[in-house]
Image (tube, helix red, strand yellow):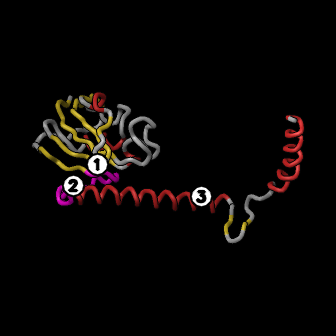
Amino acid sequence: MFRSIVWIIGVVLMFVLPSCQGQQGKSRGDESYDEENVRERMIETNRRMLDQERGWINEYINDRGWADSMVSMGNGGYIQFLVQTDAERIVSKQDVRFLCSAELLDSTEIYVEEMAVREWQIDRTDGELGLHDALKKMGKGEKARVILPSYQAFGLAGDLEEVPPRAPILYTIEIIEVK
């Protein structure tokens, strides 16, 4: 019986596979399957996903009444100072110790223990890319809320543990020490 099934599958594949060759660059109806068309469709899909995520973030900010106090960081993220000082801004390669909490936009806290106190060297320590940018806008003693889009936080795929795909993250950060 098993040999019969394998033989039938083999015969079917002999006829199907040759008919599939040479399809690249050919059209099926109105759709072209050449490499450039696929690339353009992927770019457009990515743009739509980023626009959707931007919409989620803006809606979140507006729903909380933060629109007047949240400032764009220029990387897709936003920062809102809760405590601001005259301290010098943090710069690349400085060592920074900071309190940090993080949550998804649905208020689910993530990495509670791991986030409590963090120590980073700015632009050198592996971590959420957008947090480096946010920390460089802050100084010792300052506290801020930071909202990062997925591509500046845990990536489009999330981390496959606590952070789902395409998840913007809300951070609350307080700078304890800068060296």
Establish if 98 lies above or below 49.
above
In the rendered image, residue 77, in percent from the top left (x then y), is placed at 31, 51
Residue 5 x %, y %: 85, 40
Return the x and y of residue 151 as percentages of the image width and height: 41, 47
For image coordinates 43% across by 42% down, the residue present is 158
- Name the kind of residue labelled 3 in the image: Arg
Q: Is mark 3 on a helix, strand or loop?
A: helix
Residue at left offset 34%, top offset 57%? 56
Residue labelled with disc 3: 39
Q: Give the range drawn in magenta.
A: 64-78
Find the distance from the CA under tag 2 to the CA under tag 3.
35 Å
Residue highlighted by disc 1? 147
Q: Is the magenta stretch mostly helix, strand or loop?
A: loop
Q: Which amino acid does label 2 sit on?
A: Met
Of the two numbered discs 2 and 3 on the same chain, state the one appearing first in sequence. Answer: 3
At numbered mark 2, what does the secondary structure look like: helix, strand or loop?
loop
Identify the residue at horizontal 38%, vertical 47% (top origin): 167
- Dot placed on the residue nearer the N-terminal end, 3 or 1: 3
* Residue shown at the point (28%, 48%) measured from the top left: 147
110 or 73, nearer to the observer: 110
Closer to the camera: disc 3 or disc 1? 1
Q: What element carries label 1?
A: strand
Q: According to the image, label 2 marks what residue?
A: 70
Q: Residue furthest front?
A: 1
Quadrant assignment, res 33: bottom right
Pointer 1 with pointer 2, Cβ within 8 A: yes
Q: Where is residue 142 in the image (x, y as percent from the top left)?
A: 15, 40
Decide if residue 95 is in sight here. no
